């Protein structure tokens, strides 16, 4: 009888020990899960903050870029100088041409325009209404080579000039190479047709 009670007591003690161990493991697992959840939440918060910061920065850059593009587009459309209308007319007629010079007539709004087409240099006259007359065509290897080397177009050079001197108007622009340097040589007049400024813009 005493032996049975001893065995029973031992069995109860072992069962109790196993139960306590199981509870301890469950508690440890719950604590680990809670820690992982907290870490994941912190990581998600950091990611969200980074996304907001990136979106704000991108929006600011896009706004600045759009404003600059609108300013450049306004100049390119000829709103500030009739030279752009003459350039557009020549480009429409000679889509593959490279314009190397433009010179405004002092008496009216006609322009002499040189454009490289293939291996030829065309001397054109562009009237105020956009009508084009070909005055001369010649084969000038140096002019053709310079046109092909230019990476800055006459449009960009004029835009640069008018941004520096918004009160000016184009008198003459020509592509020139001097001592190995390829530049756009630009002459600006004032609104009264008096000389305003002369300067160079890098063409390559």
Image (cartoon, rainbow, N blue to C red):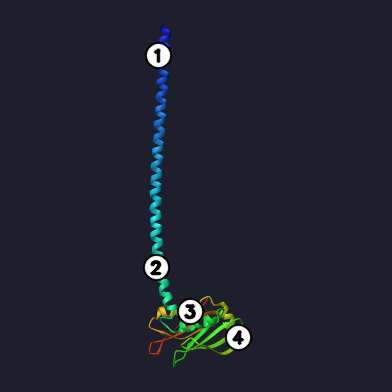
Badge 4 or badge 2: first in the primary sequence? 2
Q: Mark 4 points at which residue?
A: 140
Badge 1 or badge 2: first in the primary sequence? 1
Q: How far apart are marks 1 and 2 (CA)?
A: 83 Å
Q: Mark 2 points at which residue?
A: 64
- Residue 94: image location, x then y, percent: 55, 81
Q: How far apart are marks 4 and 2 (CA)?
A: 43 Å
Q: Which of marks 3 and 4 is in front?
A: 3
Figure check: 133 above or below 45? below
Front residue (pair 91, 118): 91
Q: How far apart are marks 4 and 1 (CA)?
A: 116 Å
Q: Residue at the spot x=59%, y=80% of the render? A: 145
How many callouts does the rendering have?
4
Q: Is residue 175 visible?
A: no
Q: Neighbour class for label 3 at 10 Å: few (<14), some, many (≥20)?
A: some
Q: Name the residue under label 3.
A: 155
Q: Circle 3 — which element?
A: helix
Front residue (pair 50, 109): 109
Q: Do the residues under discs 4 and 1 have CB atoms within 8 angstroms? A: no
Q: Residue at the spot x=41%, y=24% of the render? A: 19
- Residue 124: image location, x then y, percent: 53, 88
Image disc number at residue 201: none
User: Is residue 159 found left or right of 134 in the rendered image?
Assistant: left
Image disc number at residue 9: 1
Q: Do the residues under discs 1 and 3 have CB atoms within 8 angstroms? A: no
Q: Circle 1 — which element?
A: helix
Q: Circle 4 — which element?
A: loop
Among all residues in the image, which is located at the extreme bottom? 107
């Amino acid at each position: 009888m005493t032996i049975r009670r001893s065995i029973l007591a031992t069995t109860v003690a072992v069962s109790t020990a196993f139960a306590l161990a199981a509870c301890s493991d469950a508690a440890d697992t719950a604590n680990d899960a809670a820690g992982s959840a907290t870490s994941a939440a912190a990581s998600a918060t950091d990611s969200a903050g980074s996304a907001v910061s990136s979106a704000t920065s991108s929006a600011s850059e896009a706004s600045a870029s759009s404003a600059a593009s609108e300013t450049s587009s306004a100049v390119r459309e000829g709103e500030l100088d009739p030279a752009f209308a003459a350039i557009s007319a020549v480009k429409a007629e000679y889509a593959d041409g490279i314009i190397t010079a433009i010179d405004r007539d002092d008496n009216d709004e006609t322009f002499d325009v040189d454009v490289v087409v293939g291996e030829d240099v065309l001397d054109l006259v562009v009237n105020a209404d956009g009508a084009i007359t070909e005055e001369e065509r010649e084969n000038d290897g140096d002019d053709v080579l310079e046109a092909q080397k230019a990476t800055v177009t006459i449009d960009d050079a004029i835009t640069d000039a008018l941004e520096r001197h918004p009160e000016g108007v184009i008198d003459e622009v020509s592509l020139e190479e001097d001592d190995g340097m390829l530049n756009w040589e630009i002459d600006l007049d004032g609104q009264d047709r008096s000389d305003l400024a002369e300067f160079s813009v890098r063409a390559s």
